Image (tube, coloured by chain):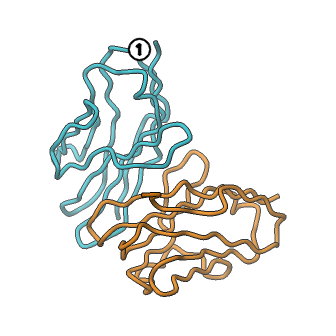
Chain colours: A orange, B cyan
């Protein structure tokens, strides 16, 4: 079992450019989360999906961030345009249901220059 | 509001010594508390959750509702325990985890 797979692992972009992250959750996991982890901080939830429905996106900065989970499996998180302050690690996690253990991916480390 | 506080960003102890990582929370209802661990170059993973009441890798944690704490303890630290530890809370009816800032534990030989 590969676990939650994220790509890319690292990304360096110039400010104002777009960027996208991809997440493949554990097979059969209906719940998918995107977390943001700033340096020296704990993860903070950006968005949570139940199947293909975004059920909690209250912390997602919708002016520049968007996410989708087509067919209730893989998910992409996009930033357009990126700002210097978006430099962080973006974590994807999945769980079998809303109360189950959340399994995390390796994360994507974004650097905006 | 849900909040998790880990007062120590860094903690260093010698091998064989007892270790305690502190976690305090703020929540008005009955929360579910977790400890997650991230070893060097590995992904964040669940260490233990309070409802399981189990010991994992020699670690235990007791939920103290009176003191709103969920401290992680191990009587004899081992070098392989060196890692980043995060305390997390999930509120009633909520599905998201709220994390503390984390404590970097270093076990010295």
- Is the N terminus of chain A in the top left, top right, bottom left or bottom right quadrant? bottom left
Q: In which quadrant of the rendered view does residue A49 lie?
A: bottom left
Check the image and report above or below for B60 versus A82: above
Please state the chain letter of the residue tagged with numbered disc 1 in the rendered image: B
Dot 1 falls on a residue whose secondary structure is strand
Residue at image x 23%, y 62%?
Answer: B28
Check the image and report above or below for B55 versus A57: above
Residue at image x 56%, y 41%?
Answer: B41
Residue at image x 82%, y 72%?
Answer: A16
Q: In which quadrant of the rendered view does residue B58 lie?
A: top left
- Is the C terminus of chain A in the top left, top right, bottom left or bottom right quadrant? bottom right
Q: Farthest front residue?
A: A1
Residue A59, given in percent of the width and then of the height, sits at 51, 73
Residue A24, given in percent of the width and then of the height, sits at 51, 69
Of residues A110 and B26, which is closer to you in this image? A110
| Count of numbered marks | 1
Q: Is residue B105 left or right of residue B59?
A: right
* Residue, disc 1: B14
Residue B35, given in percent of the width and then of the height, sits at 33, 46
Check the image and report above or below for A90 versus B77: below
User: How packed is label 1: few (under 14 Cα within 10 Å), some, or many (20 or more)?
Assistant: some
Q: Is residue A62 left or right of residue B55?
A: right
Residue at image x 40%, y 70%?
Answer: A27
Check the image and report above or below for A4 versus A82: above
Q: In which quadrant of the rendered view does residue B22 lie?
A: top left
Q: In this view, does A83 lie to the left or right of B24?
A: right
């Amino acid at each position: 079992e590969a676990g939650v797979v994220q790509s890319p692992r690292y990304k360096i972009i110039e400010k104002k450019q777009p960027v996208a992250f991809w997440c493949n959750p554990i097979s059969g996991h209906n719940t998918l989360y995107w977390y943001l982890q700033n340096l020296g901080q704990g993860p903070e939830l950006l968005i949570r999906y139940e199947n293909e429905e975004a059920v909690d996106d209250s912390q997602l900065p919708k002016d520049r961030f968007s996410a989708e989970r087509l067919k209730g499996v893989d998910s992409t998180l996009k930033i357009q345009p990126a700002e210097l302050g978006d430099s962080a690690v973006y974590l994807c996690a999945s769980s079998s249901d809303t109360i189950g253990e959340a399994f995390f991916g390796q994360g994507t480390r974004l650097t905006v220059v | 509001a849900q909040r998790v506080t880990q007062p120590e960003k860094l903690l260093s102890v010698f091998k064989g010594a007892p270790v305690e990582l502190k976690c305090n929370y703020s929540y008005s209802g009955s929360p579910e508390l977790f400890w997650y661990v991230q070893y060097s170059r590995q992904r964040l993973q669940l260490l233990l959750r309070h409802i399981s009441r189990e010991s994992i890798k020699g670690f235990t944690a007791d939920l103290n509702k009176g003191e709103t704490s969920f401290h992680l303890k191990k009587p004899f630290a081992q070098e392989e325990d060196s890692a980043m530890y995060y305390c997390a809370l999930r509120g009633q009816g909520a599905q998201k985890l709220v994390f503390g800032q984390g404590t970097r534990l270093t076990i010295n030989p």
